[in-house]
Amino acid sequence: MSDTPTTAPPQLHIPEEPVARRPGWYEAVLAGRPIDEVVGGPDGVARWLWSRWRVLAATSVTEEAFVALVLDYRREVWLWLAGERTWAQCCSGLAGRIGRRRDH
């Protein structure tokens, strides 16, 4: 057993689904905009989520690291955009991934 205290990852709530933004992100991909740009760009899904999960800023997760995590999760984000996953499924999976990454 280690004497080093461990901190539990923050509990991330599932934010309200960005229903007004979703069609624009989806259409951008269909129009040829790279999915990495739609997910990780300045007006993308990751930055939108970062603004709702600001509690991460008080942890070891930086905004850049967060965007990288969301980009690694882009397949699931795409499935949400395409209507194959619910927003709750997308966010809860991402929150779990963030928690696991912080533990290592």
Image: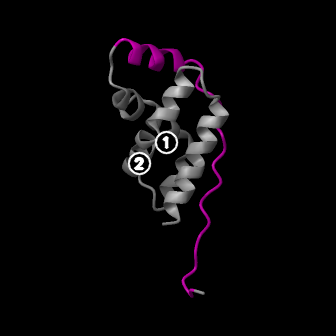
The answer to whether residue 15 shows anywhere in this view is no
Q: Is 34 rendered above or below residue 3?
A: above
Give the residue type at disc 2.
Glu
Q: Earlier in the sequence, mark 1 or mark 2?
A: 1
| Image quadrant in which you'd find residue 43 | top left
> Relative to the observer, which residue lies in front, 97 or 21?
97
Q: Amino acid at mark 1?
A: Trp
Number of disc labels: 2
Give the residues drawn in magenta, as a range: 2-31
Instruction: Identify the mark at residue 63; answer none if there is no mark.
Output: 2
Looking at the image, residue 95 sits to the left or right of residue 74; the answer is right
The residue beneath circle 1 is 50
Q: Is residue 91 magenta?
A: no
Q: Position of residue 51 (x, y in %)?
A: 51, 40
Whether label 1 touches label 2, CB < 8 Å? yes
Quick one: 22 or 56, which is closer to the camera?
22
**Relative to 63, does residue 39 appear above or below in the rendering?**
above
Q: Position of residue 72 (x, y in %)?
A: 42, 43
On whether residue 15 falls in the magenta region, the answer is yes
Identify the residue at image location x=33%, y=15%.
32
